[in-house]
Each structure stands twice: as C-alpha cells, then as structure tokens.
Image: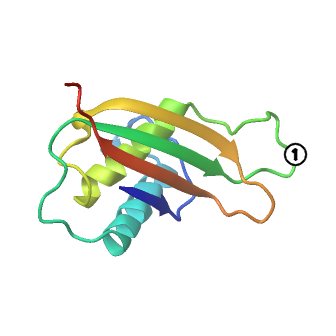
Amino acid sequence: MSFKIEVAPVPAARVKHGKWGAYYPARYETFRKECTHWLQENLPLRKMLMDGEVEVISTFVCKKPKKPANPYPRGDIDNFEKALYDAITSSKRVWVDDTQISMVRSQKRYTVGREKPCIHVEVRPVNFE
C-alpha cells in the first residue's frame, strides 16, 4: 500500500508539563490532527486492517528555508517517523497499532523546484519465513 500525504512533515515533540497538566506543543498537535484528517479523507475505510508485522518506507519532504543552515532538514528522523506513525495509528486506516512495525527505511530532504512539502509512505506486510 503506497500513498502520499499532502501535509508538511513535522517532527514529534516531547510532552510539555505546565501548571494545568501535560500537553504537546501546538505545532505538533496541529500536524497530528491535519495528517490524521488527511488519511481518513483520502484512504478508504478497510474491513481488515493490517494485523501482522509491517515494513514502512517513508520520505519526508520538508519546505526548504530561504537560507538553510544545513543541507538537510532540521529534526531527528526518528521524531518525523514517530509523528507519522501516531497519525496513521489514529486514522485507523492502515494498521491496528504502530507496534506492528518491524522494519523501517526513512529519509528526509528538502523540496526541489516547485515541489510541495509532503510525506511519501509505503507499507508492506513482512514475512520472515
């Protein structure tokens, strides 16, 4: 199963603790909601979600700043992955839980030319036999 999520990627953030309890920063919370909504609107509701081990191949295409400090996007790749996996799990469109992921290949890069920020995702069942 392959799809392109047309939402700009954001790395997962750590939980913040304030005097009214724990919360996620607004930027991350907005990403999770937008990404989950996109998945629910664009992926068909499946009678059977993937319930075995899966491999996830992902490319995070981030907006390039006018004067980038690095030749690669800021944010740890594992945090981009976590944000994606949380949104996919919340959407209830692909797998039952992200604990099913047993293989991962990911990359992050800047947009090229007129390309828009997005996330390319491929999810495959894993068969170790």
Q: Quadrant of the N terminus?
A: bottom left
**Residue at image point 38% right, 37% down:** 15
For this orientation, the residue located farthest to the bottom is 41
The image quadrant that residue 83 belongs to is top left
Return the residue nearer the eye: 44 or 92: 44
Return the residue nearer the eye: 81 or 34: 81
Residue designated by label 1: 67
Image spot of residue 53 (x, y percent): 22, 35
128 left or right, relative to 64: left
Q: Residues within 10 Å of mark 1 (few under 14, many from 20)?
A: few
Return the residue nearer the eye: 124 or 82: 124
**Residue 22 visible, this orientation:** yes
Which amino acid type corresponds to the residue marked 1 in the rendered image?
Answer: Lys
The image shows residue 12, relative to residue 43, as above or below, that is above
Image spot of residue 101 (x, y percent): 29, 34
Number of marks present in the image shown:
1
Image spot of residue 114 (x, y percent): 77, 66
13 left or right, relative to 61: left
**Residue at image point 39% right, 40% down:** 56
**Residue at image point 36% right, 68% down:** 37
For this orientation, the residue located farthest to the left is 47
The image shows residue 76, relative to residue 84, as above or below, that is above
74 left or right, relative to 112: left
**Residue at image point 36% right, 29% down:** 103
